[in-house]
Each structure stands twice: as structure tokens, then as C-alpha cells.
Image (cartoon, rainbow, N blue to C red):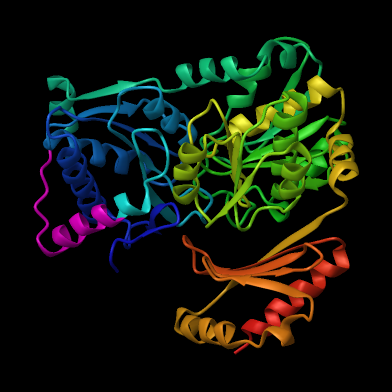
Amino acid sequence: MKIKFGTEGWRALIDQDFNLDNVQICAQATADLIKAENSQTIPTIIIGYDTRLKSDLFAKTVAEVFAGNDINVLLSKQPVPTPVVSHAVWSSSASAGVVITASHNPPEYNGFKLKMPDGSSASPETVDKLETHIRRLEQNPKIKMSSLSDATNSGLVKRTDLESSYIEHLGTLFDLDSIRGSGIKIIHDPMYGSGIEYFSELFSGQSSKVKNIHAVANNSFPGIEQPEPVENNLAILSETVTSMKYDIGIANDGDADRVGIVDENGKFITALETFALICLYELEILNKRGPIIRSLTQTHMVDQLGEIYGVPVIETNVGFKHIAPLIHKHDSLVAGEESGGFTIKGHMPDRDGILCGTLILDMMVKTGKSVSELIEWLFNIVGPHYYKRIDIKFNNAYKAKILQKLDEADAKSINSELQNINKSDGFKYKFKNGSWMLIRFSGTEPLLRIYAEGNSKQEVDNLLLKAQELIEI
């Protein structure tokens, strides 16, 4: 199988396609790309890694390849969240960043994320260039390497603390002391990943309390199919919040660039509701203005907020590699996608689950409202919205037939109230009452995803049934 980058980096099965040989090829291709774009200087690349099986080994291997190509390397001393690496690149003069992580994928996967000089995900143009180098090396794998000990002794590789400057930066965006002194009770679920202890470090020490669950590194992610902060993976978090009478549950995925929120009653807050709250925080509480960037899988509640507050809302394809360029182009206020990844102005143009969990805490403190009261406030402004996503495993042999069937579907058979179909990233059907459904293939996993947002639970269920009828073969 070829090394192929998807929505966010390259991911594959550990010790099958994601093995030392292929990781070396990917690292050498990255070195060739970065050196070609920094021909007048000696590049510096920051490397981080998560808690997955062999992530530390793969990260060291990448460092050895970069050192063999005379590239300066700052290698994290321990597993770190992806946003911590992104911040380190964004806030420094580094040429790029690499994170060894498969994010929210199942435990048998690992991955390679490339970060641009501004901390954002590698752009489609950069990925195309990188894959050109990869194809060449797959045919003729000439890899330059220097042992980690030699590279460390020569000063090319330095082990470094990436966390401290990131924590300090969050303190410039939020009044962390007001949260620490608010008495708020937080349960954090890092899902055995690299976000372990971050909320404890941020908010312990005064009247607020932080309790951690699943807060030991475990590369098998026991009890969950994959470390993704979605409702079906957060039952224990919900039960713990209610049984211990805590105010909020905050979950992060395996590399902590996504967030999941549970309210004081144990109810899961969807990523669409969370994004709408983040927009409301910026627009109403902070009284800021600026464009909102959202993926086509994100809520149309923010379109309503855009109309109310007089700011444009710009829709784009799924993935921060599509969102980040628009953040720069439009100097956006908020940006986010349905998967639970969001960012705000003043932060790097990359998703950050720790940032967004902190923002919701700050919103609670500034308003004096519980999470459920924040949702009620939101719905009073934009009306009630309901959302659901279904993930379906599929045989890749049927992909072409499914796409053909969707392409040939009669619009009238879908819904007489259909307003338009957007085929830029899957098939998004928008209806005259503002509801929508989307059918698209995941860019990182062998999954067909079906999304729907509507004005009632019944409408959402009906849309999901219609979508499943459309893809039956």
C-alpha cells in the first residue's frame, strides 16, 4: 500500500504499512521538501508524539532522518498534544512540525502529521509536493540517517519542553486565575492520550477542582473502540459527572486536538452545539466581530448567529487544511469543523481541544451559567437544533457504485423541499427549512459518514433513514 495522506496526515496500521521503513521514507520526503523550500537557511523542525504503541520509537526515527539531512530538530521530551506542537511551530521560527499520532483512530493505527510554519495542517498543495517526493523514494529509497546519540552529541537534535510556552500562551487568551478561583468542578477525560494532566495543571490549586479519568497512558484505549470524544465513548464520563455532582465533563481525543463536552446532567453536547457556543462567546460575551469559517459538516446555527451579529459565515470542505487558508485570507474570528476541532483569533490556525475546553469554562465563569443553561440561551437565540452522525464501515470495492448511485439520484425522490446539492466534499443536501444531510467518505478511515441537522429529532432520524436508502446497493 502506498503512503497516502488523507484529510489530516498519513495513517496506517502499525507494523504493517506504518512501519520503520515507510516512516523513514515519509521523513526523508519531508526533509527533501523542507530543505528545498529553505535553501538559504538550515531548517528547524519540531517533533512531537502521542501515547500510541511505538510512537516514541517512530518519533526518534524521524529525528534521526532529519539529523541525517542536516536539519535541526527539537524533539519533545515526552508525549504531547498535537496543538502543543502546532503552537510551538507557530510561535517560533521553526520551518515545520511533525507529530507522530493517529489522533482518534483505533489503537492499531499510527500516523504522521505535517505542520506548516504557521502551525496549520499541511495544505493540499504541500501534500501534493510531499507525495511526489514519497513516490520517488518508494522506487529508490535512499535514506540519510544519523544515530540519535550522534545527532544529540553534535547538537542537531535537542530534547525540549514544548508544554510551558503553550500553557503561558493560554494565559494570554483567558483569565485562568478567575477559573481557578471560581469553585467550578471539572472532570477531564483525556481518553488515555497525550492530553493527560493538562486540565489539572491549568486549573488546580485554588477553589476549583479537577478530577481525571482514563488519565494513564494506555495504547490499547481500553473500554472504547477508538479515542474519539463522541457520545458513545463518553458514558463513563457522563456517569461520573452526575454521580459526583460535578459541573462539567471535558474529553479530548488521543492527541487532544478535539473536544467533547458533557453538561452537569451528564448530557453530551454535540460538536455543533459546542461550536455555536464558541461563536456566541466571541460575538456576545467578548463583543468581537469577524468572519466565521466552518466546514460543510458544521452547524447552520452559526449562519443564524452571523445574520444576527452582522458577520459573514464561510463554508468550506472538511479538514483544517482547507480551513486554515481561509482563516488567513479572511482574518477570521472563529473557525471549526464537526469533528470537535475549533480555533479562535489570536491562536494558531489549527484545532485545539484544550483551548476550546478552557473557553467553555471561561464562558461559564463569565456568565454564571451552567452548561445546560448556556445551551438554553443559545437555543433561545437561534431556535432548537438537533444533530446526529452515523458512521458505516464499508467495503472499498463498493465505493464507486455508491458514488454513482448518489450522483444519479433523482432530486425529487430525496425530498420535495430540497433546495440545493453541494458536491464539493461528498453530497450535501440542503432543504428549504434550513435542515440538511450529508453523505461523504472519511478521509482518514474506511468509513462512510452520514450527517443530519434539523429542527426536531424526528426530522433528523428521517433524514438519516433517507440517506441510508440512497446508499443501499
Rendering quarter of residue 419: bottom right
| Quadrant showing the C terminus | bottom right
Q: Which residue is drawn at 76% across and 77% down?
A: 465
| Quadrant showing the N terminus | bottom left
- Nearest the viewer among 24 and 419 is 419
Q: Which residue is drawn at 41% across and 34% down?
A: 119
Give the left or right position of residue 449, taking residue 94 as reference: right
Check residue 319 for magenta coloring: no
Check residue 132 for magenta coloring: yes
Q: In this view, does 347 lie above or below 259?
A: above
Q: Using the rendered image of the protein, determine whether residue 350 is visible from the camera's viewpoint.
A: no
Rendering quarter of residue 77: top left
Q: In this view, does 294 lie above or below 353?
A: below
Query: Residue 181, position in %: x, y?
Result: 76, 11
Q: Give the range drawn in magenta.
A: 128-145
Query: Residue 285, position in %: x, y?
Result: 77, 25
Give the left or right position of residue 411, taking residue 369 as reference: left
Q: Residue at x 26, y 51 (%)?
A: 23
Q: Using the rendered image of the protein, determine whether residue 301 is visible from the camera's viewpoint.
A: yes
How many numbered marks appear? 0
Q: Residue at x 91, y 43 (%)?
A: 380
Q: In this view, does 45 lie above or below 455?
A: above
Q: Is residue 364 above or below residue 461?
A: above
Give the left or right position of residue 329, taking residue 238 as reference: left
Query: Residue 221, position in %: x, y?
Result: 56, 48
Query: Residue 381, position in %: x, y?
Result: 87, 42
Main secondary structure along the magenta-highlighted residues: helix
- Nearest the viewer among 317 and 158 is 317
- Nearest the viewer among 341 and 415 is 415
Rendering quarter of residue 120: top left
